[in-house]
Structures are given as structure tokens and as C-alpha cells.
Amino acid sequence: MTGTTDPEEALRDRISADSLTSRRDYLRVMTTVSGGLLVGSVAVSAGVLHRHGDAEAAEVPELRVADRLARGQAVLFNYPGEHDRAMAVKLADDTVVGYSTVCTHLACGVLWKEHRGEEGELYCPCHEGSFDIRTGAVTGGPPPRGLPKVLMVERADGSVWAVGTAFSDESVRHAACRQLGAIRPGTTVPSCPSGGGN
Amino acid sequence: MTFPSAEPPHWSRPGSDEPRLNRPVPERYPQIRPTSGYADPRVVHSGPGPGAGTEQEPERSAVLSARLVIVLSVVAGQLWALNVGVDAWMQGRTGTAWWCTGFEALSFVIALGAWWLGPRDR
Ligand code: FES
């Protein structure tokens, strides 16, 4: 690629370029990879990845997941979308918590292990990832993010309902404000940060 | 034992019966040169000589290596940024994810520049 026309010169260049071939190819390949990473990043930011809780919050009705739940018992359901696998657990102090059961590491199914840890924990058997049962935060293993939450309520009659979602590591309050903003745009709730949170 | 003449017996005479075929190699095959088999006309002896297999243009080689190192570092940075971006997006922090995308774009421009700035080696 010297643009020279002198054959002697061209031969010389070819010979000295010879030993550089693999590095040149490597350079080209890696530059292409760099472009690929840019494309991937644009796709991620634009939202190609499925995210638990992305099913239009405004349109998902509350879901009755159990008529009653005993302490230490877990129930599996799909919420908010048909394919968003989730689990609710009633803890020893009667709190009901809910999480996506898709591990944030490589998407294995997360299990409720009542006898692990102090209060029990959510455990992923694939690579021994574990999550705090109260917050969904990662307590061990390779998962990079906490589990997305399903916001649960227990009605007076003992029935357990899924009423909303929160992304990985998002506070319940932030998530509730965000979903309120989606359902009724423009409303200002005093306890929510202005803008509803995005 | 005596030989009738200085000529070896016909059965032990090397070469061909045809004198045409007994001429020296360069005469028989003018295409074959002492350097045949080598693309480099500077190689005049067979076998590795001094400097065989080394860089012909060390500076050019060094520049290529440097460009490669730059692009590899850039790609490492991009992998990290993609990781941060995916985490941010999954946590609902879309703004941060777009910042990571901006970083990726900048990195790609640098990588493209490092590739582009070597007209002889790309
Ligand atoms: S998939 Fe859950 S820890 Fe790897």
C-alpha cells in the first residue's frame, strides 16, 4: 500500500512488510472489535436487553400470587410479564419479599434456601451466587448486580399480591415513584424526588 | 589390475550418454539462479546468513507494535465500559448507560485513528 510504481521498491516493501503481517491483521481485527463494542453499547443503552419490570408498568394489573403464605414458605409466579419468573417469600417476621428468580450472573434459576445464612437466602446453584433475602443485594459469588424486586403486599385476608417491580439495586421508594410517574404522568408526590425518578 | 585406457568403463561413467545433457546446470536451466527459491534478491547464498529472519525495518515494526498496543488498551477499556453500561442500564440508570456509550464511541475513534495513521501497515 505504498503507492510506489517502481517494482524494485515494491519488492523491497513487500519483503519488509512480510514479517509484520500478523500484527497488521491483528490491528485490523481489534479495530473492528472496537467498532463492534460501540455498536453493542448503543444497543444496550437503546434497550435491547430484556429487563425485569420493563413490561409497561402502567398496564400490568396487580397479581394475586397466593391465598396465604406460611412463614418460611415461598411461592413462584410470573410477574409482571408472562415470562418474568419471580418468587415471593414470607420471612420469619411476617415480611413478604419478592424477587425475580433469574440470576443476574448467567440467568440460572435462583432458589430459596431457608436454612442458609441467618434468615435464609436466595441461592443460585450454578456458580454459588447468593443474595440477601431482605434487599436482594449480592452477598456472595459472581453475580454483578442484586436481584430485581417484585413489590409485594399482604392483604388483611392473608392473600399475597404482586403490585410492582424495582430494578436491580433500586430502592423500593425510587421504583414506586418511577411507576407512579408512569401511571399518572405529571402528578407530583411530595415524598418522591422531583421528576419521579428515571 | 590395469585399465586399457584412462576412460572409466562405460557402466560407471557419470552423467548421460548424451553430451547435451551433461552441460553445467546454469547452461541447461538458465532459469535457475544461485538465488532461486528466495524472494529476496539480496540473498546470494543459500541457508541463513547474518541477519536472516530479523526485521527489515525496525522503526516501522516498532510503530506498528505501538499502534497495536494502543488499540488493545482501547478495547480493554471498552470491555470495561460495556460492563459498567450494562449494569447501569439494568439498574435503571439509563443516563449512565448513555455516558458509557459515549465513552465507547470516543474509544472507537481513537482505535480507528491508530489504525488509520499507518498508511503502509493497515
Ligand atoms: S448463574 Fe447464578 S451464579 Fe452464575
Image: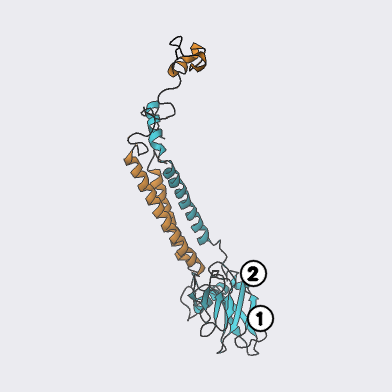
User: Quadrant of the rendered structure where residue B77 is?
Assistant: bottom left
Q: Which chain is orange?
A: B
Q: Residues within 10 Å of mark 1 (few under 14, many from 20)?
A: some
Residue A131 horizontal side relative to residue A76, left or right: left
Q: Chain of mark 1?
A: A
Depth order, front residue of A17/B103: A17
Q: Nearer the viewer, mark 1 or mark 2?
A: 2
Q: Nearer the viewer, residue B113 or B65?
A: B65
Look at mark 2 in the image and give the residue it sits on. Answer: A83
**Is the residue B98 above or below the residue A176 in the image?**
above
Colour of chain A in the image: cyan
Residue B65 visible in the displayed image = yes
Q: Quadrant of ligand 1?
A: bottom right
Number of the label disc, if any, that sits on residue A64: 1
Q: Is residue A157 above or below residue B96?
A: below
Instruction: Report the side of B17 relative to A59 (left or right).
Output: left
Is residue A140 placed above or below B51 in the rendered structure? below
Residue B67 on image: x %, y %: 37, 47
Residue displayed at 40% across by 41% down: A20
Q: Earlier in the sequence, mark 1 or mark 2?
A: 1
